[in-house]
Amino acid sequence: EEVNIPREGETESESDSDRQGHIDKETESQRDTERVKWNRRMAMMVRKKLTYRGCSHFRFRLVLATLSGHKVKITDIRSKDESPGLRDFEASFLRLLEKVTNGSKVEIDFTGTTVSYTPGVLTGCVNGRHDCGRTRPVSYFLEALMILLPFAKFHSSISLVGITNAPSDRTVDLLRTVTLPVIAGAFGIPVDGLSLKIKKRGAPPNGGGLVEFTSPTVTTIPSTSLDDFGKVRRLRGIAYCTKVSPVLCNRMRDAAKEVLTPYVKDVYIYADSYKGKESGSSPGYGLSLVAETTCGRLIGADAIGEAQGTPEDAGVECAQRLLSEIRTASCVDTPTQAIALIFMALSSDGVSQLHLGHLPMHTVQVLRLIKDFFGIVFKIDEDFDTGGYVLSCAGLGLSNLARKVR
């Protein structure tokens, strides 16, 4: 017969009552966690229609609507401009969503100032092709595909035609060397099948570039913790040019090294010159830099050569932008913040954390959209040691229903 021996200094009744109280607390905590998860899943199942005004964050509104299944209506799109309504790149983005989904419904009024979007099933596309136009670069569309396609029904592969490097958006070089490694390493996207290949360069205004993107699918996304920046150990970069003399790459590289070598000695910048059919339809040049820290964090910056500027100006500008990003000590750079926060909100069981050196208004607006579509509220704590912020949340646990959960 088993006998419960009480601890020293307590009676048998006290030992049993304390143990039972501890078990009750654990059970109650588990019930609270399950109740929160159940409420979130039920909130996702109840489809609702969200209404927004204006054209800001048009892309993220549609991306989150596709993942959540909620209908969205956007009104007063540039209603007071001389040319009101949707722009070419926004209409092209709607066509791209129709290619990677099945059953989506888009309604646009005759003035083009009101758009209603009913998301369908996210199926992905195999050997697809999309013309991104000449208004915005292909990275504007690629960032959305990086969020959507991991939750698609099939492994996807798509070719995007257009401008590969432009001042308005992040270059495809940094999407390949910074954004893809971040989502693969921190959020468990399989490396096998995740690739971004630059077949042709396309400089503004005529573009002519070609990019091939392939993405695998996942069942769920694990929670992550990105709270330690570390120290910068090396810098890498790509100086590229199309339809101009390769000497411009060397001039950009030398100008950037003069700014960076006083801080980090391990600096290597690769020169990439394109000619012939691979150089696109317009001449151009630019520089992309990546800083790698001792904790594996990747921080990027880029600069595009201007018609009235010199290659030295582009090199110095890119180096200064990179130093500004490093100074914030954020675990992800500014253009990657929105993608990282969305994956954190969709992650599975557990609490995800992310350290950011600053919170721009674009990131704040994405946090508001995440709350609207998923009901996820981030906890923001100020880090007095580094002067930044620590953002944490319990993920929704979004599952890819097209794949079996093992």
Image (cartoon, rainbow, N blue to C red):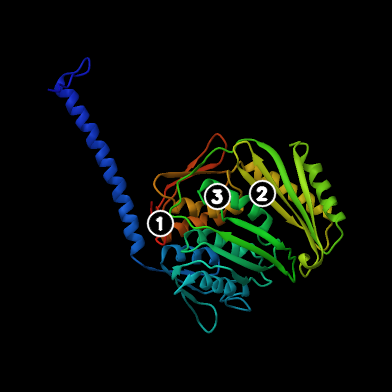
Where residue 300 is drawn, which disc sits there?
2
Residue type at numbered disc 3:
Ala
* Discs 1/2, front: 1
Label 1 – label 2 distance at C-alpha: 31 Å
On the image, the x and y values in percent for residue 378 come to 44, 49
Residues tagged 3 and 2 counted as in contact (Cβ below 8 A)? no
Mark 2 Cα shell of 10 Å, populated few (<14), some (14-19), many (≥20): many
Marks 1 and 3, how far apart in space? 17 Å
* Rendered image: mark on residue 184: 3
Which residue sits furthest left? 1
- Give coordinates of residue 390: x percent, y percent: 50, 42
Give the residue type that dot 2 points to: Gly
In the image: residue 136, left or right of residue 262? left
> Dot 1 lies on which element?
loop
Q: Is residue 166 visible?
A: no
Say which residue appears at 74% left-offset and 37% top-offset: 264
The residue to which callout 1 is attached is 399
63 horizontally vs 34: left or right: right
